[in-house]
C-alpha cells in the first residue's frame, strides 16, 4: 500500500506518494513549500486520502472569486439557464455579488465573510425576497465549485443564514373605479397606453404577457385571448420567452367593453398602416426568437396588438412614461401595472365563490396560490349551492 513520504529540498519540505499508473508507468504525486516535516506529512496524508477517495488529487483553486463567477456563469448559467435566469443572475453578479466578494480568493471565502455579505444587504435596505435571491445565487455558484469543479471541498454557504425580517402586513393597492376612469381619461382610445391598460384591467394578464400578444392570439368571434408567450428583454434585445408555469398557458374570455376597444384599435392600426405606407414599421422574428423591425428571411410579420402609431413594437419599458404621469400628474402614487391584475382577481373573488375560475384566468400553478392572496365570497356561494340543489331535487 502506498505511503506518504517527506523530503527536504533546500529550506523547505515536500511530500510525495504513489499515484495511479498511466500507460503502465508509475506516477508520483508531490508538492513542496512546507516549512516543517510535520506540515508536509499532514498535507500529504490529506491529499492522498482525497486522491484515493475521489480518483484525483484535491488542489484548492487559486482563482479569485471574481474570475470564478465568470467561469461559472459562462459554463453553467449560459448553458442551462433560461433567458430570464441568465439576465437576473448577471444583474445579481454585477450589481451585488462581485463588488462585495470578487476581491477574495475562491478558496479563502468562509461562512463569516459570506454571512457579513448577506447581513449587509439587509442593512442596505434590500427586501427579504431580494436578499434571499442573492443568497441563492451565491450558493448556486459555490455549490458548482464543489461539484463538478472540485475547486473547494465544501460550500462555505452551508452555514450562512438569512437575516430575520419583521413580518409586516402587505396591503396591495386596488385600482378603484374612480382611479381607473382618471387613467383612461389621461390615456384615451388612440393613445399608445390605452390598450395595455384595458387588457390588464379586464383580463388580469401579466405585463409581458400583454405586450407579447399578437392579433392572431385574439379571437374576436368567440371573444377570447390566448396566452402562450411573453415579451422578454435580454442582452439589449427584445424577443419571446416561455411563460412562468405550464398553467400560464391559458385562454381567457372577455366581454363587450374590451371587445369594443380591441375592435377600434384593430381598425386604427389598419388605417395607420395605410397612412404610413412603406414607412410603417413591421416586426419580424429570427429563428432564435429575437424581434427585428425588418423582414428576416421567410419569417412572417408579427402583428402586435400593442404597437405605436408608426407600427413600432410597444413594450413594457415604454410604459414607464405612463406610470410616471399617473404618479406625478394624476397623484395615484401606488399605481403599477400589476395592480390591474390584482384588482381584476380581487373583484372576481368578491363576486364569485369558485376559486378555480380565478386560478384559471390568472394562470396560477395551484389553487393554494389563489386562495393565499384572494378572499372569496363563500357566503354567496352557499346560497348558490342551496339554489342549485333545490333545482336538482
Image (tube, rainbow, N blue to C red):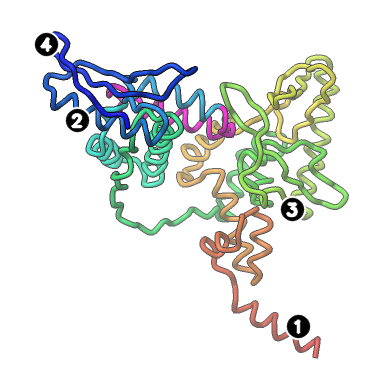
Which range of residues does the magenta coloring cover? 79-105
Is residue 319 in sight in this rendering?
Answer: no
* CA neighbours of label 2 inside 10 A, class few (<14), some (14 to 19), many (20+): few
Look at the numbered disc 3 and give the secondary structure of its residue.
Answer: strand
Instruction: Judge from the rendering whether residue 18 lies leftward or rightward of residue 149; answer left or right.
Output: left
User: Which numbered disc, 1 or 4, marks the residue that appears first in the sequence?
Assistant: 4
Q: Quadrant of the N terminus?
A: top left
Is residue 110 in sight in this rendering?
Answer: yes
Q: In which quarter of the image is residue 321?
A: top right
User: Which numbered disc, 2 or 4, marks the residue that appears first in the sequence?
Assistant: 4
Q: How far apart are marks 3 and 1 (CA)?
A: 26 Å
User: Which numbered disc, 3 or 4, marks the residue that appears first in the sequence?
Assistant: 4
Q: Main secondary structure of the magenta part?
A: helix
Q: Which label was assigned to residue 252? A: 3
**Pointer 4: what residue?**
11
Q: Which of marks 1 and 2 is in front?
A: 2
Instruction: Judge from the rendering whether residue 16 lies leftward or rightward of residue 368; answer left or right.
Output: left
Look at the numbered disc 1 and give the secondary structure of its residue.
Answer: helix
Instruction: Judge from the rendering whether residue 277 lies leftward or rightward of residue 25; answer left or right.
Output: right
Q: Which label was assigned to residue 388? A: 1
User: Which numbered disc, 1 or 2, marks the residue that appears first in the sequence?
Assistant: 2
Question: Which residue is at a point 52% across and 60% down the rendered structure image?
Answer: 373
**Pointer 2: what residue?**
42
Q: Position of residue 113 (x, y in %)?
A: 24, 34
Amino acid at each position: 500500500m502506498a505511503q506518504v513520504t517527506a523530503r527536504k529540498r533546500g529550506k523547505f519540505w515536500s511530500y510525495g506518494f504513489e499515484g495511479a499508473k498511466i500507460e503502465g508507468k508509475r506516477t508520483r504525486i508531490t508538492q513542496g513549500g512546507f516549512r516543517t516535516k510535520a506540515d508536509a506529512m499532514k498535507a500529504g496524508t490529506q491529499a492522498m486520502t482525497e486522491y484515493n477517495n475521489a480518483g484525483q488529487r484535491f488542489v484548492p483553486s487559486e482563482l479569485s472569486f471574481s474570475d470564478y463567477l465568470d467561469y461559472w456563469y459562462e459554463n453553467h448559467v449560459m448553458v442551462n439557464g433560461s433567458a430570464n435566469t441568465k439576465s437576473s443572475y448577471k444583474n445579481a453578479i454585477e450589481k451585488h455579488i462581485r463588488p462585495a466578494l470578487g476581491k477574495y480568493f475562491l478558496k479563502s471565502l468562509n461562512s463569516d465573510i459570506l454571512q457579513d455579505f448577506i447581513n449587509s444587504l439587509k442593512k442596505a435596505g434590500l427586501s427579504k425576497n431580494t436578499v434571499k435571491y442573492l443568497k441563492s445565487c451565491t450558493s448556486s455558484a459555490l455549490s458548482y465549485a464543489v461539484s463538478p469543479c472540485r475547486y473547494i471541498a465544501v460550500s462555505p454557504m452551508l452555514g450562512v443564514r438569512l437575516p430575520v425580517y419583521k413580518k409586516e402586513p402587505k396591503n396591495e393597492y386596488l385600482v378603484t373605479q374612480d382611479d381607473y376612469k382618471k387613467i383612461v381619461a389621461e390615456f384615451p382610445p388612440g393613445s399608445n397606453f390605452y390598450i395595455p391598460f384595458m387588457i390588464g384591467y379586464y383580463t388580469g394578464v401579466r405585463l409581458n404577457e400583454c405586450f407579447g400578444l399578437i392579433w392572431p392570439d385574439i379571437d374576436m368571434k368567440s371573444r377570447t385571448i390566448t396566452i402562450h408567450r411573453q415579451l422578454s428583454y435580454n442582452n439589449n434585445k427584445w424577443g419571446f420567452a416561455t411563460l412562468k408555469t405550464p398553467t400560464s398557458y391559458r385562454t381567457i374570455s372577455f366581454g363587450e367593453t374590451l371587445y369594443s376597444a380591441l375592435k377600434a384599435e384593430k381598425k386604427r392600426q389598419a388605417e395607420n398602416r395605410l397612412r404610413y405606407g412603406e414607412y410603417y414599421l413591421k416586426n419580424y422574428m429570427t429563428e432564435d426568437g429575437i424581434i427585428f423591425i425588418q423582414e428576416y428571411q421567410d419569417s412572417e410579420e408579427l402583428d402586435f396588438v400593442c404597437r405605436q402609431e408608426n407600427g413600432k413594437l410597444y413594450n413594457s419599458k415604454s410604459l414607464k412614461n405612463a406610470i410616471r404621469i399617473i404618479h406625478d400628474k394624476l397623484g395615484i402614487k401606488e399605481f403599477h401595472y400589476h395592480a390591474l391584475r390584482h384588482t381584476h382577481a380581487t373583484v372576481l373573488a368578491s363576486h364569485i365563490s369558485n376559486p378555480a375560475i380565478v386560478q384559471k384566468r390568472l394562470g396560477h400553478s395551484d389553487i393554494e396560490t389563489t386562495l393565499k392572496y384572494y378572499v372569496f365570497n363563500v357566503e354567496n356561494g352557499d346560497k348558490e349551492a342551496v339554489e342549485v340543489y333545490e333545482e336538482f331535487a
